[in-house]
Amino acid sequence: MRVADGDPGVECQLDFAYMGMLDDPHTGRRRKVHALIFSAVYSRHQFVWLTYSQTLSAVIAGCEAAWEFFGGVFAVIVPDNLKPVVNHADQLTPTLGDGWLDYAQHVGFGTDPARVRSPKDKPRVERAVQYVRGNFWAGEHFTDLDDAQARAERWCREVAGMRVHGTTCARPLEVFTAAEQPQLLPVPARYDQPILKQVKVHKDFHAEIGKALYSLPGQWIGVTLDARADSELVKFYHRGQLVKVHPRQRPGARHTDRADLPEDNVGYAMRDLTTLVATCAGHGYHVGIYAERILDHPLPWTRMRSVYALIGLVKRYGPSPVDAACETALVMDVISVSKISSMLAAGTETATPQLPAAAGAGHTRFARDPSEFTVPTRHITAVPPLPEDADPDQESNR
């Protein structure tokens, strides 16, 4: 039974077809080349997209190039049961892939997949496969895939588009330009293909997507969420409800929201010295000063463990004794949490500090009397000078 073509600009059928082998200069070996063929149902105008793979990225890249070629988007796409498009084939309610649904929503077309092993559901493109393989690919020599793609687009316009079609008895390009192109949907902005995957939130409050880590609240630890990451944002969903949004990070980076972490651990996880000192100051003025003295170091984050030990003493002995011990230690200029712990254990945090005596004060074991260092004065009698005619030997005897 022949099915009517429908209204202009509504339906476009597409299918993958194997073309042959082609040298790949990037890998240095021959690879299989597949053609994603688009066939407009009303005008029979065609577009051919050549690719090495049949992934979702290849299908979307072919669709993007097809909309540019046609100058618009068809309202309904009739694909074969491509794995990137259809997750579960069914005659009545086929299940489409999340990636394809996201792209279809972005562009604005509907999808009506053909039934399994039912080529008559898309006869316009099925018949075009033999024509593309025999008229365009057979007997041709291409330097690489880019050369083949450029020649394929020229063939679609000048050969396939300008031939007199056997069924419509008209030139497909002329019919498309006159009747279909004005009815097409506008070409949308370039599609930013996202990463779609399911991720599990780990005990460190983070989930991984695109080799980067993103934080989530503790209530989602151990739960598997749906993640969508494009070039700008990363979104996490639970049963269709948005639960968290992060800016996209490069591979190896991490983005942590302070609100997602427990209040007791946020300073440690973020290495936030200001918050850590403020926490200590909340237990006592001298405790805060003591924490600042501990962190006064070229690498302050290496001293954070000592500050947390000081906070542990507050939890054990209470704020007042620890504040008194810190005050005493500051007077003695002793910066050591171990000394604070010893003072609290001995109960000497409120004892008056004994400052060391000044040098020379009091009697010491090896002290000597200052008179011992006095040098006695010697009196020398002056000798009168000899006359000018005196004997030198006599002078030497003197």
Image (cartoon, rainbow, N blue to C red):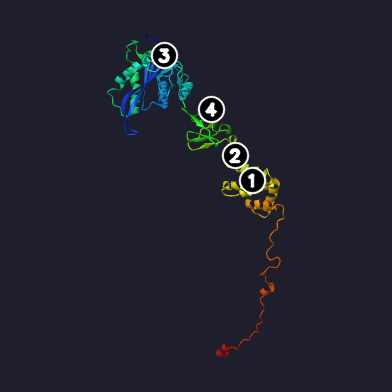
Residue 101 screen position, x and y as percent: 47, 22
Provide the residue designation for mark 3. Answer: 180
Q: Residue furthest left?
A: 139
Q: Is residue 170 left or right of residue 205?
A: left
The mark closer to the camera, 4 or 1, is 1
Provide the residue designation for mark 4. Answer: 237
Is residue 280 at all visible to an observer of this figure?
Answer: yes
Dot 3 or dot 2, earlier in sequence: 3
Report the quarter where the C terminus lies.
Answer: bottom right
The mark closer to the camera, 3 or 4, is 4
Q: Nearer the viewer, residue 198 or 127?
A: 198
The mark closer to the camera, 3 or 2, is 2
Q: Is residue 26 left or right of residue 361?
A: left
- The kind of secondary structure element at disc 1 is helix
In the image, residue 32 above or below residue 325: above
Amino acid type of the residue tagged 3 in the rendering: Glu
